[in-house]
């Protein structure tokens, strides 16, 4: 028996090829455990409908990290996606996970609420699969899967590149061989490697620059300093800022409910999940008098008194609030944030996707100006990430030529470093073990955890870095 609680968002083109049995490849933004099961949610937006029809589900049979150095033509063959769409994927992300999926037909189609963002979408109810209906039988699936295995699907680090052959087109494949010394001199090898590594670094930097371009405009749209050469109307400037705030809130995990949006003069934004959040956006050099009262009036009218009072309430502006805005904010428990503070949250989530816990964030949304509290939350998250990176590095160092490292060895090495290195925070044994288990979870994928005899043992091994 298999239960499905959510659906993986994939391209509709990709899904069409998967359900036809022509391919078994797809993409995920996050690492997926082998044999993880989920519905397949086509990434389409249907006007005039609140739901999407889902007809298929899948099991993950392989999950490997890839980056933009792999030949796009080969990836197009594996996933049936156009080259242009693959280029767009790698403009948004430096790396992604390539999956091998065993696809099945659902006993009956289901309707899933449309969702614009997120790697996974929640199903309205858990689906229980008692009998599997595969698109391909075992032999057919094995044949198609084998056709995708002639390409190495693991990231090759710069350190590895210095020891391996890199061809003139910088295609990284598992079939690449070491340069033979009788054909290419050592100096020539080094020259080829250094040149291609330098090109790769430049390409990655361009991708990173493209990815954060919109993020850099959040604060400038807030105070309108982005305007050059001509002046926008107040309405247009306000709309531009409202749109970028909506994108920002969705990016860090809020679900924006457009049902309560009132247009010009109406409620700016209402987030329904993970908790109600009523938002008023004000672009310009100041947050003008009456803004708090405006939020209270419009929020109460649109949501009703009880629903509005239960919601968190937020004013986001490019400038400083007037004194009356602050006084009313304290009285009505409204938080006031600068556009730059929202930008900081988005930048944090862009660097470490999924690092913002909106439930943990909520207590930091205090009445009045809350920028300093949000800064403290950001520092807390960054500190927690740094700690996990340090633990991961110790596992990597201790593992060396071993297959795995015991938790006792990791604990001893960590305590030794904490004693002599001021930059490393000392933590108790339980906290260390919790972090190791967290890093080895299927969704994290930074460490592996040894399993023998059906039981987990406290031994871990390195999989990938968590760069700071």
Image (cartoon, grey):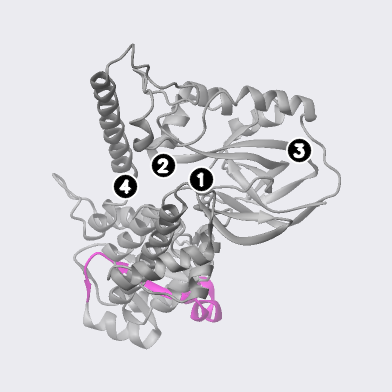
Question: Which of the two discs, 2 and 4, labels the residue nearer the N terminus?
Answer: 2
Expressed as whole percent of the image width and height from the top left, the position of residue 353 reads: 44, 54
For residue 333, which quarter of the picture? Answer: bottom left
Q: Residue at x 31, y 59 (%)?
A: 343
Whether 43 is drawn above or below 281: the answer is: above
Expressed as whole percent of the image width and height from the top left, the position of residue 154 reads: 49, 36
Q: Residue at x 72, y 36 (%)?
A: 103
The residue that mark 2 highlights is: 93
Q: Residues within 10 Å of mark 2 (few under 14, many from 20)?
A: some
Image marks 2 and 4: residues in contact by CB distance under 8 Å: no
Image marks 2 and 1: residues in contact by CB distance under 8 Å: yes
The residue that mark 3 highlights is: 104
Most foreground residue, 28 or 153: 153
The circle drawn on residue 212 is: 4
The residue that mark 1 highlights is: 29
Measured Cα–Cα span from mark 3 to mark 4: 38 Å
Measured Cα–Cα span from mark 4 to mark 1: 17 Å
Of tags 2 and 4, the one toward the viewer is 2
Most foreground residue, 62 or 452: 452
Expressed as whole percent of the image width and height from the top left, the position of residue 426 reads: 38, 74
Measured Cα–Cα span from mark 1 to mark 3: 22 Å
Magenta-drawn segment: 299-321
Query: Is residue 357 visible from the viewing direction of this image?
Result: no
Most foreground residue, 151 or 323: 151
Of tags 4 and 1, the one toward the viewer is 1
Local secondary structure at mark 3: strand
């Amino acid at each position: 028996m298999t239960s499905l609680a959510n659906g993986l968002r994939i391209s509709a083109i990709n899904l069409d090829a998967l359900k036809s049995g022509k391919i078994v490849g797809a993409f995920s933004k996050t690492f997926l455990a082998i044999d993880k099961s989920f519905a397949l949610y086509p990434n389409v937006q249907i006007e005039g409908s609140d739901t999407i029809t889902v007809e298929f589900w899948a099991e993950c049979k392989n999950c490997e990290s890839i980056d933009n150095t792999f030949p796009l033509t080969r990836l197009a063959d594996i996933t049936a996606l156009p080259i242009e769409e693959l280029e767009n994927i790698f403009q948004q992300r430096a790396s992604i996970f390539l999956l091998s999926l065993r696809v099945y037909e659902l006993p009956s189609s289901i309707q899933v609420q449309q969702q614009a963002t997120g790697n996974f979408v929640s199903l309205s109810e858990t689906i229980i699969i008692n009998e599997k209906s595969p698109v391909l039988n075992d032999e057919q699936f094995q044949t198609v899967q084998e056709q995708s295995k002639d390409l190495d699907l693991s990231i090759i680090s710069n350190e590895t590149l210095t020891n391996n052959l890199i061809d003139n087109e910088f295609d990284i494949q598992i079939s690449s061989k070491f340069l033979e010394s009788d054909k290419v001199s050592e100096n020539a090898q080094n020259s080829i490697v250094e040149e291609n590594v330098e090109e790769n670094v430049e390409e990655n930097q361009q991708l990173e620059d493209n990815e954060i371009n919109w993020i850099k405009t959040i604060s400038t749209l807030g105070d309108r300093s982005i305007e050059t050469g001509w002046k926008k109307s107040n309405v247009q400037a306000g709309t531009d800022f409202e749109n970028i705030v909506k994108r920002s809130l969705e990016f860090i995990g809020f679900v924006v409910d457009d049902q309560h949006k009132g247009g010009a003069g109406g409620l700016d934004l209402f987030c329904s999940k993970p908790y109600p959040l009523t938002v008023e956006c004000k672009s310009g050099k100041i947050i003008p008098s009456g803004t708090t009262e405006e939020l209270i009036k419009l929020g109460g009218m649109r949501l009703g008194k009880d629903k509005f009072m239960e919601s968190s309430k937020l004013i986001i502006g490019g400038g400083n609030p007037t004194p009356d805005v602050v006084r009313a904010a304290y009285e009505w428990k409204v938080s006031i944030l600068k556009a730059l503070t929202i930008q900081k949250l988005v930048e944090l989530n862009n660097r470490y996707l999924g690092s913002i816990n909106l439930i943990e964030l909520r207590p930091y949304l205090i009445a009045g100006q809350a920028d300093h509290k949000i800064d403290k939350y950001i520092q807390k998250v960054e500190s927690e990430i740094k700690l996990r990176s340090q633990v991961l590095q110790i596992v990597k160092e201790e593992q060396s030529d071993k297959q795995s490292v015991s938790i006792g060895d990791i604990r001893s090495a960590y305590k030794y470093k904490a004693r002599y290195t001021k930059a490393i925070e000392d933590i108790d044994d339980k906290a260390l073990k919790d972090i190791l288990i967290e890093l080895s979870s299927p969704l994290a994928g930074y460490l592996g955890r040894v399993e023998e005899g059906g039981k987990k043992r406290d031994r871990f091994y390195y999989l990938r870095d968590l760069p700071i």
